[in-house]
Image (cartoon, grey):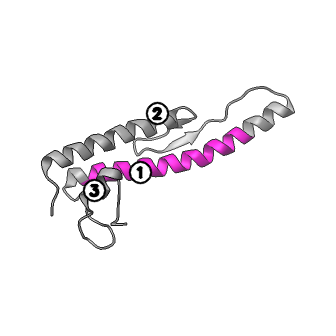
Amino acid sequence: MALDEKTLAILKEKLLTEKARLEEELSVFAKKTDADGNYETRIEEIGTDEEDNTIEVEDYVDHLGLENNLEAQLKDVNDALTKMDKGVYGICERTGDTIPEDRLMVYPSARTLA
């Protein structure tokens, strides 16, 4: 069963809110490199001594892992918004079945039934 317009509007708002949150989180430690939602972690320079350099590298490594995770989430959100525009939102990528509305309400960027 296809989603009605009211439900789609609610889900789109959830996706747009999530997109803004993810972009805000990423902007704290990374810069956007293109329109596709790719980011590059910045290395913050705190000082020049060995201890400062160690902290910089540790922060960079931590941020790099977080960047990858947040970028993947952002890609899912952007893909869901694109599917909405194409009229194929809410369809399981594995089975072609409709993803239940209650699942989409909890996880609007869901790609599969489970």
Q: Is residue 10 magenta?
A: no
3D distance between C-alphas at marks 1 and 2: 15 Å
Q: Residue furthest bottom?
A: 95
Residue farthest top in this picture = 47
First in sequence, mark 1 or 3: give its number: 1
Describe residue 48's horizontal placement relative to residue 102 as left or right: right
In the depicted structure, whether residue 112 falls above or below residue 105: below
The reply to whether dot 1 and dot 3 touch (C-beta < 8 Å) is no
Q: Which mark is residue 75?
A: 1
The residue range painted magenta reads 58-83
Q: Is residue 64 part of the magenta span, yes or no?
A: yes
Q: Amino acid at mark 3?
A: Asp
Give residue 1's position: percent from left, percent from top: 15, 64
The image quarter containing residue 42 is: top right
Q: What is the x, y in percent for residue 20?
A: 39, 36
Q: Which residue is mark 3?
A: 102
Q: Residues within 10 Å of mark 2 (few under 14, many from 20)?
A: few
**Residue linked to disc 2:** 24
Residue 18 at what x, y percent from top left? 38, 41
Magenta span: helix, strand or loop, mainly?
helix
